Image: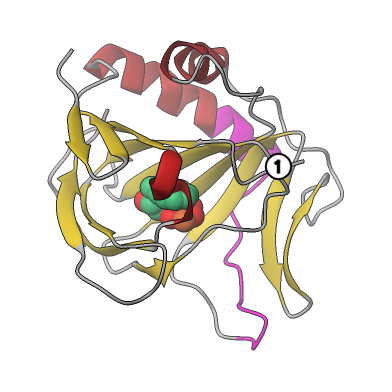
Amino acid sequence: MPVLRVRDFEIHPGYFSTDEQAALVAELRAILAKAPLVQPVTPRGTPMSVRMSAAGEYGWISDRKGYRYEALHPSGVPWPPIPECLLTMWAALVPDARKPECCLINWYDPAARMGLHQDRDEADLTQPVVSVSLGDEALFRMGNTSRAGKTESVWLRSGDVVVMGGSARLAYHGIDRIRPNSSTLLPKGGRINLTLRVVT
Ligand code: MD3
Ligand code: FE
């Protein structure tokens, strides 16, 4: 399978086959039935456009109290286990890493976006993050470890996997926009992004 490298971002186009993507979406539906998507607000109270849930030992939460990882969904139930196919992918792509403790689930409607940010709520920032894109295509912007400097953008398609290690782990990144109706994976359209993380 070909790999695209943009700085320290390692992109695996079409890592998951169409059948694997469909099976994964079915597993995600079961997870979301137990741990429903919520629309987070920023600590200042602004609603985010992306809806979120999680699987694994921890989920990432944003609300008026701040950003943090929590062992329970806001409803009080534990997060469901991470699907086996994602654990297998993690072991294949980042064999030296610790086991993932969170699979964050981001759901984008056609108007949703994610501003340029760093992910640094995890305790061990030497551990990689691995992301899986499902559904509609998304314009992914990759920056630098500071907000300054040039950025590069790439369209992520359904089934693509991105490994963020090395300097990419602390690079600013975001999703500028979704391309509506660019995939038939999700019957009502939209995009799901999964990010596997080591939290502790
Ligand atoms: C680079 N998600 O959940 S995936 C996020 O498509 C997030 O939903 C985007 O940024 C999405 O925090 C982008 C690619 C990604 C994910 C996590 C990273 C890139 C990353 C963590 C560190 C560095
Ligand atoms: Fe991020």
From this view, report whether residue 69 is shown above or below residue 162.
Answer: below
**Is residue 29 rendered to the left or right of residue 7?**
right
Position of 50 compared to 151: left or right?
right
Question: Vertical placement of 29 versus 72: above or below?
Answer: above
Residues drawn in magenta: 29-45
Residue 6 x/y as whole percent: 20, 43
Q: Which residue is mark 1?
A: 199
In the rendered image, is residue 5 in sight?
Answer: yes
Judging from the image, the colouring scheme is: secondary structure
Task: Where is residue 173? Give x, y as percent.
Answer: 36, 60
Quarter placement of the C terminus:
top right
Image quarter of residue 142: bottom left
Is 46 colored magenta in this rendering? no
- Name the amino acid, label 1: Val
Viewer-closest of 151 and 54: 151
Residue at image coords 49%, 63%: 118
Residue 160, picture quadrant: top left
The outermost residue toward the bottom is 44
Decide whether the magenta segment is chiefly helix, strand or loop: loop
Q: Does the stretch in magenta take in 44?
A: yes
| Left-right relation of 71 to 156 | right
Locate residue 172, reporting x and y percent. Answer: 39, 63
Question: Looking at the picture, does residue 138 appear above or below residue 177?
Answer: above
Mark 1 element type: loop
Assign the N terminus to one quadrant of the image: top left
Residue 103's x, y, as percent? 59, 36
The front one of 139 and 30 is 139
Q: Looking at the image, which residue is at 66% across and 24% down?
A: 98
Residue in the image at 59% along x and 40% along y: 126
State whether residue 107 appears in this view.
Answer: no
Total tally of numbered discs in the picture: 1
Residue drawn at 39 percent across, 44 percent down: 192
